[in-house]
Image (cartoon, helix red, strand yellow):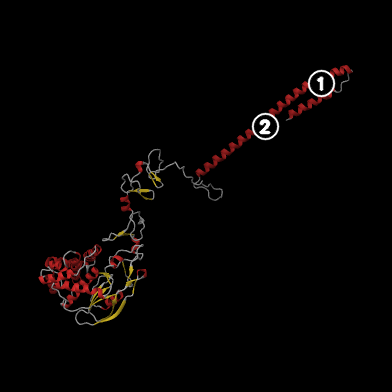
Amino acid sequence: MGWLNKIFNGRGKKNSKGSNRGKSSEDSVSDDHRESITQDVQSESEYGDIDHAIALSLAEEEQKIEKAIGDSHFEEDEQLARALQESMSAESPPHQTKSAYQPLPYSPPPANFRICARCKNEIGYGYYPSYMDFAWHPECFRCYACNIPISENEPCMHGDRPYHSFCYRKNFPKCDVCKNFIPASINGQIEYRVHPFWQQKYCPSHQKDGTPRCCSCERLEPRDTQYVNLGDGRKICMECMNYSIMDNGECNPLYIDIREFFEGLNMKVEQQIPLLLVERQALNEALEGEKNEHYHLPETRGLCLAEERMVRTILKGPIIGPGNKIVDMITGPQQLIRRCEVTAILILFGLPRLLTGSILAHEMMHAWLRLKGYKDLPPEVEEGICQVLAHMWLESEITSGSGSNIASTSSSSSSSSSSSSSSSSSSKKGVKSEYEKKLGELFKKYQIEMDDSPVYGDGFRAANRAVDEFGLKRTLDHISMTGAFPS
């Protein structure tokens, strides 16, 4: 701004020169007038120069500021470029300072922005299938199981994957026990167990988590159902409970029916063998005292006793109380005295009539063999032929014909008198419900025919082949002489 000071200094010198002149008054007035006019002109000229100078000064200052700002921006750009270059070349982002970069939170797309749930690409305008919160391209709306397009208005969903209803039920079954979808295993496969007869599907974990089974039909107890607690560690479902035999009084008619069945096969049991219904503990205690017996583990449900002992039996059957627990059951001791080779037959209480009858037929055959002098038979031979008799009785019960008619077909020596006795037995049998018929098929097929144990299962199949080929009488005669099945 030095040039501005020069202007003001020059103006001061002109004023001081004019004031030192000495002239006449007229000349002085005239000169003063002219000088004032001149000064005015000069003043205006000087003020114009000042304004021009100020404008130039401001322009220069503005250019300096803009240059400084431009230089600053250039430096900032260089710094930013260097920082980006360093971050790209670094192995990992810095985490040691609090000023590290933090990603912005996810902002959902606008409501009209649609993404295909299958291919994850944007869906344009026009028709597109949608269900729940998902949308698809028309060509992407396919079943994840069979890959066939889905035409259902409401497909079955598993996560964001649509399925046909049939494919969903096949690939994602619900557990019949816990009612939840059966989870996938570690390898991603849906694995579950199925009862071969009832087709009950359940999670594999229920085999080990203490879920109770019905002691009759073997089905697992569903979470929304309560089985009846028999008080000896067993539980029974309500369907089987409707046909269960709870005490000795209820079992006597069945005992008579089994004796008549054997009589129809010309295998009359002469002695009156006591029959007792017992709890599991009493049966296990009696089992421990027996010698040279072969039993099908893990559950023994019947026993043909040959030793004298005291047994606690059920005198009066219980009723179902609160919480599906049995109450008011009366038990009492009974002394068994050996009068022959067989002391008594013990059967677990609380089992359905058909299962109780098949167990009783099996144990009755043990008694018949002992009373007839069949001794020291191999386990698979004795248990196998006893299973054949249980199977024959069950078959007679679940078919339209009487038990002895079927047995007579297997035995070549059945007489007309046995047919008449079996007819009287058949007339005592009431009409069976569909569920009871299914129970009979279960016991016959899955607990006898398909038994995989070497003694009971293999023994039955060998005995049954012999009876089918040679008849019951010839098979028994051959066992008496050789201790083996005929072949």
Sequence order check, earlier mark of 1 and 2: 1
Compare residues 430 and 256 and report the one nearer the observer: 430
- On-image quarter of the C terminus: bottom left
Instruction: Describe the element under mark 1 as helix, strand or loop.
Output: helix
Query: Badge 1 is on which residue?
Result: 36
Query: What amino acid type should be assigned to the residue bearing mark 2?
Result: Glu
Compare residues 167 and 101 and report the one nearer the observer: 167
Could one spot residue 400 in this view of the protein?
yes
- Drawn side of residue 21 relative to residue 294, left or right: right
Q: CA distance from mark 1 to mark 2?
A: 36 Å
* Position of residue 180 measured from the top left corner of the image (x, y, whole percent): 36, 57
On screen, residue 84 above or below 409: above
Compare residues 253 and 116 and report the one nearer the observer: 253
On screen, residue 123 above or below 60: below
- What is the crowding at mark 2: few (fewer than 14 residues within 10 Å), some, or many (at least 20)? few
Quadrant in the picture for residue 479: bottom left
On screen, residue 116 above or below 220: above
Residue that appears at 37% across and 70% down: 322
Query: What amino acid type should be assigned to the residue bearing mark 1?
Result: Ser
Quadrant in the picture for residue 287: bottom left
* Position of residue 296 measured from the top left corner of the image (x, y, whole percent): 25, 70
Query: Badge 2 is on which residue?
Result: 61
